[in-house]
Image (cartoon, rainbow, N blue to C red):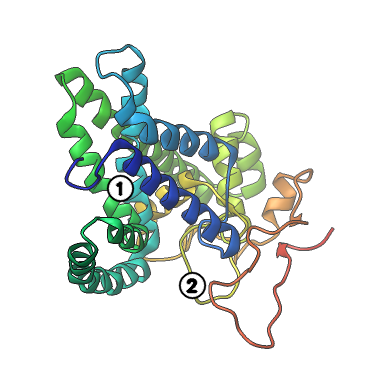
Amino acid sequence: MKRFFQSKIHFLTMNLGIILTCCYLNIRRQLFCIPVPWTWVILGLFCICFLVFPFVNKNSKTFSFVTAFAGLGFFIGLYILLFGRQEYAIFAAANLVVALILWPIILLLNKIFKNKVANALWFYGAFALAPYFLILQLIFMYKSLLTVFQKRVFISSSLVILLIGALFAFQMKRIFDKVNAAIDVEVELRSLNKNPVNNYLTELILGAHWKYHTELSCYDGWRPPFHDPVLVISNKILFPFKHFARDTKLYYYQNPNLYEKIYPDNPTYFNCRCAVKERLWDISGIEDIPYGRQKK
């Protein structure tokens, strides 16, 4: 890590700044919108463990816990890249060019002023390329670990999350198959929903496209308010080249009233905002709109 940061404090300052800036951007402009509660817990634990990683004694019992949750960064970084799709890839490529232009300028300023204050300019590139920068730091963290056990824990936490996401996706596939073969969709769903896991997944399926994010869109001017990674992972696995649930009996645009029938007590209009601005780009003469299915 020393090749990136002069000290542990520089590591903490840079990465805390990136995390806070990303949170601020998500509040100001919809990107991931409002993460569901379990996602907040995972993100919170990761951020804390990642930031304290260099400060914890690698021989302490606490370090195993820190290692496990810091290692989740591999999953988080990869998730951001896949969710961002080609839009973020184009953004990252453009900002990589900017970062390369900044490089000689930073070196020149450091030489002129005979200090490394100009290194602060690297924050722009680190922020714009945050998931790549995160993965790169995690690789060096992995190399710094002392034992094989620590390295296995560091890697396995992301693999476990990916495995759980894949298992949920294949369980969704079973739900789709049973419903598509059923004569009465409502009866079949009520029968399936006696299982709490199926109930959770069915709510995500029926809430896709209007309540829950399925993929990033920079152009529609409006996005669903909530973000559950289970639905996004399932979308990438089950419907990688088309809308989530397309060509099934549970596709929202073909059966828009099914959510209210299966979950009559759940709200479908949300009197809140998932960002100060509903669009990534301001459009003159167009006002932001409340989100949800319909006002009850």
Q: How far apart are marks 1 and 2 (CA)?
A: 23 Å
Q: Residue 192 location in percent, x, y? A: 58, 35
Q: In which quarter of the image is the C terminus?
A: bottom right
Q: Residue furthest bottom?
A: 285
Above or below, comparing residue 150 to residue 10 in the picture: above
Q: For numbered disc 1, what is the local secondary structure?
A: helix
Residue located at (79% from left, 43% from top): 265
Please state which amino acid type lies under the numbered disc 2.
Answer: Cys
Q: Can residue 141 be seen in this view?
A: yes
Q: Which of label 1 and label 2 is nearer to you? A: 1
Q: Name the residue under label 2.
A: 218
Within 10 angstroms of label 1, few (less than 14), some, or many (20 or more) residues?
A: some
Residue located at (76% from left, 50% from top): 267
Count of numbered tags: 2
Q: For numbered disc 2, what is the local secondary structure?
A: loop
Residue located at (22% from left, 48% from top): 4
On residue 134, which mark appears? 1
Q: Residue 101 location in percent, x, y? A: 22, 74
Q: Which residue lies furthest to the right in this view?
A: 296
Marked residue nearer the N-terminal end (1 or 2):
1
Position of residue 145 in the picture relative to residue 206 (left or right): left
Which of 71 and 21 lies nearest the eye of the viewer?
21
Q: Quadrant of the N terminus?
A: top left
Please state which amino acid type lies under the numbered disc 1.
Answer: Leu
Q: Which residue lies furthest to the top in this view?
A: 61
Above or below, comparing residue 149 to residue 263 in the picture: above
Which of 241 and 87 lies nearest the eye of the viewer?
87
Above or below, comparing residue 53 to residue 148 in the picture: below
Residue located at (30% from left, 12% from top): 60
Tell me which corner region of the image, top left, top right, bottom left or bottom right, holds residue 141: top left
